């Protein structure tokens, strides 16, 4: 049965949104699905956004039914899918829990039992993202979940809300587009897909980069008028700052067959700076204010303060926000048990801190500061050592420019992400870019009403319809070049590591639905036992072709991603377990990267699948 709806899901670090559009109706407006959720104990309301927070219930809350929604998403959906996904990785049983607005509030009141920023962990290769590690650092007696399981839990809630509202249109039969950061590497994308399929989304779901989704939302709003606002040669900068990451993307305006078209020309690296960092900066500032009141915060009160500062920031920076707002946390001392402590945060202080700390004036030649780190480092999310987003933007424009023209000069600007709901932050970024290129070179913000909370989901739904031939599509293909690390042959020397070469297997811009043989010499692989391929990617080496071999590189050029691991099944007709192969790359129509090992001595071929290192 053909799909009835194109569905767009924004699985956000801070909030998730579900949008949809009927495929049988021409020029139908993209709709937002109301999502029922607990907003207070025993109080269920429908909201346009589902906060991406997971509260793990205490023992006395289990089995009471206090957190059961009409469809009982905590039990029924998982039970329904258990038979299909029991053997799949990432299908850890999630403890009794709630998702949404009440869970978000619990982050301030019970931080040891609340999972936040699960999405930021999906791309962090130094931990096993299938292991129950969240809430990170919580006491041993608190049940924990994996980043993959938490992500699956959010999606289960969204799916249940859809099927309760549209029982005639099961989600497995729809055209589903799920968004990911443009900076996610192949393993982060694969883990997102894994969580999505385990939750009940169709195997045919498509992953779409969030900045592109924001552009699609703008296109949906502007209709044909967009062609009067952009012209051939224009360059659009999408600056997307969400709760956990900063995503930078450049899209060029070209001409194909006499018609304007859009092509993605660059994406940035994974920059772990966003609204969470800003909340943490405010919390650090407020710690001093609590000390002035003779209140020393313990570690978990500090976590609670972090979440309380998020709420205060959103209230203060709203269009009609007050001049100050109380930041309140639960007391811990014998005189404070059951009580609260409050200190006011004023808008002027918060504005100065965020502007100077995250959007400082800088030169176009500046690069993010690299502070010397200690040899010992606490395991946790690798936040950037330099939080100045303006310096990261300057480095991005320089990296994708050229020696003759210099850094890229964007002609237009599209803001996305909840951070830019604050006028003063949008104005500061335009001011800084204007300082780089002069008044005439300042990029023009795109016209139109751009809803920063809902744009990504709406754009994803529009893209789902566009894939059916009902709208313009942004071309661009693979956002990075990908490389396999090849260890050179040679005599073993004690204490010396054999040199590593990087073989390009996917070029930048390789389109979905295409495949290519990788030229070059034979590579030996072992069948019947696990083989490990070191993998690298680059967002700046756009001229490399399949078969190109790099003998050396800098960290700015190539970054190592998760290893590609596979146990190639033995072949009965091959006696030698060591088989010479060549590589064949394939980007599927769904945007999934497959790397094939093709035997040069037989008709056998093996597909390598992405998995996650567990060290």
Image (cartoon, rainbow, N blue to C red):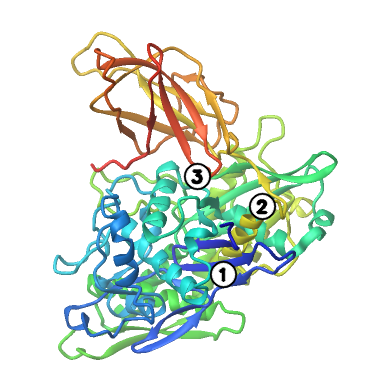
Mark 1 or 2 closer to N-term?
A: 1
Whole-Å distance between the Cαs marked 3 and 2? 31 Å
1 or 2: mark nearer the eye: 2
Q: Earlier in the sequence, mark 1 or mark 3?
A: 3
Q: Is residue 391 visible?
A: no
Q: Confirm whether residue 488 shows in the render.
A: yes
Q: Residues within 10 Å of mark 2 (few under 14, many from 20)?
A: few
Tell whether 259 sits left or right of 327. right
What is the number of the mark on residue 269? 3
The extreme front residue here reads 1
Mark 1, secondary structure of its residue? loop
The quadrant of the picture occupied by the C terminus is top left
* Separation (CA) of disc 1 from disc 2: 26 Å
Q: Residue at x 31, y 54 (%)?
A: 85
Q: Which residue is mark 2?
A: 468
| Sequence-wise first label, 3 or 2 | 3
Q: Residue furthest top?
A: 491
User: Is 567 situated above or below 157?
Assistant: above
| Viewer-nearest residue: 29 or 99 | 29
Q: Position of residue 477 (x, y in %)?
A: 60, 39
Tell me which corner region of the image, top left, top right, bottom left or bottom right, holds residue 36: bottom left
The answer for how far apart the CA atoms under marks 1 and 3 are is: 23 Å
Left or right of residue 423, residue 132 in this image: left
Q: Using residue 361 as the reference point, say whether residue 335 is left or right of it.
A: left
Q: Residue at x 68, y 49 (%)?
A: 473
The residue indicated by pointer 1 is 453
Give neighbour class at mark 1: few <14, some 14-19, many 20+ (Cα, 10 Å): many
Q: Which mark is residue 35?
A: none
The answer to which of 134 and 512 lies nearer the viewer is: 512
Q: Closest to the observer: 44 or 551?
A: 44
Badge 3: few (under 14), some or many (20 or more) residues near its Cα, within 10 Å? many
Q: Is residue 245 above or below residue 293?
A: above
């Amino acid at each position: 049965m053909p799909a009835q709806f194109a569905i767009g899901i924004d699985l956000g670090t801070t909030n998730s949104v579900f949008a949809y559009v009927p495929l049988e109706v021409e020029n139908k407006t993209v709709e937002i699905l109301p999502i029922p959720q607990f907003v207070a104990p025993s109080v269920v309301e429908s909201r346009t956004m589902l906060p991406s927070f997971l509260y793990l219930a205490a023992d006395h809350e289990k089995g009471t039914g206090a957190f059961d929604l009409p469809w009982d998403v905590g039990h029924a959906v998982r039970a329904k899918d258990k038979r299909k996904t029991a053997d799949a990785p990432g299908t850890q049983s999630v403890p009794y829990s709630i998702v949404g607005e009440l869970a978000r509030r619990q982050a301030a009141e019970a931080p040891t039992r609340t999972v936040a920023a699960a999405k930021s962990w999906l791309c962090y290769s130094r931990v096993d993202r299938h292991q129950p590690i969240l809430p990170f650092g919580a006491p041993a007696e608190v049940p924990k979940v994996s980043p993959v399981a938490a992500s699956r839990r959010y999606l289960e809630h969204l799916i249940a809300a859809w099927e309760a509202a549209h029982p005639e249109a099961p989600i497995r039969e729809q055209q589903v587009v799920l968004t990911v950061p443009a900076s996610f590497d192949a393993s982060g994308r694969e883990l997102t897909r894994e969580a999505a399929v385990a939750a009940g989304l169709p195997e045919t779901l498509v992953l779409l980069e969030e900045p592109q989704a924001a552009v699609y939302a703008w296109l949906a709003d502007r209709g044909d008028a967009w062609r009067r606002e952009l012209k051939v040669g224009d360059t659009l900068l999408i600056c997307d700052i969400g709760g956990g990451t900063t995503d930078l993307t450049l899209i060029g305006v070209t001409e194909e067959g006499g018609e304007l078209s859009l092509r993605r020309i660059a994406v940035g690296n994974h920059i772990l700076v966003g609204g969470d960092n800003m909340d943490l900066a405010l919390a650090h500032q407020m710690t001093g204010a609590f000390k002035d009141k003779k209140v020393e915060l313990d570690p978990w009160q500090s976590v609670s303060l972090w979440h309380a500062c998020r709420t205060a920031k959103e209230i203060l920076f709203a269009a009609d926000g007050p001049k100050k707002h109380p930041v309140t946390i639960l007391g811990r001392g014998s005189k404070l048990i059951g009580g609260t402590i409050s200190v006011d945060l004023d808008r002027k202080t918060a504005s100065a801190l965020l502007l100077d700390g995250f959007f400082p004036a800088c030169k176009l030649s500046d690069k993010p500061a690299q502070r010397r780190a200690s040899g010992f480092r606490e395991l946790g999310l690798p936040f950037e050592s330099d939080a100045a987003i303006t310096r990261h933007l300057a480095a991005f424009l320089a990296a994708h420019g050229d020696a003759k023209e210099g850094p890229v000069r964007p002609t237009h600007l599209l803001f996305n992400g909840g951070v830019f709901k604050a006028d003063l932050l949008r104005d500061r970024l335009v001011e800084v870019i204007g300082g780089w290129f002069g008044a005439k070179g300042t990029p023009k913000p795109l016209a139109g009403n751009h809803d920063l909370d809902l744009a990504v989901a709406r754009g994803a739904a529009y893209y789902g319809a566009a894939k059916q031939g009902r709208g313009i599509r942004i071309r661009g293909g693979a956002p990075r070049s990908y490389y396999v690390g090849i260890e050179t042959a040679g005599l073993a020397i004690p204490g010396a590591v054999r040199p590593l070469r990087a073989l390009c297997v996917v070029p930048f811009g390789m389109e979905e639905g295409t495949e290519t043989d990788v030229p070059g010499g034979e590579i030996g692989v072992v069948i019947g036992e696990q083989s490990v391929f070191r993998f690298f990617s680059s967002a700046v080496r756009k001229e490399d072709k399949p078969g190109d071999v790099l003998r050396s590189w800098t960290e700015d050029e190539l970054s190592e991603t998760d290893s590609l691991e596979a146990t190639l099944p033995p072949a009965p007709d091959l006696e030698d377990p060591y088989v010479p192969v060549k590589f064949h790359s394939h980007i599927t129509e769904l945007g999934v990267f497959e790397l094939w090992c093709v035997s040069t001595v037989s008709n056998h071929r093996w597909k390598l699948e992405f998995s996650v290192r567990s060290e």
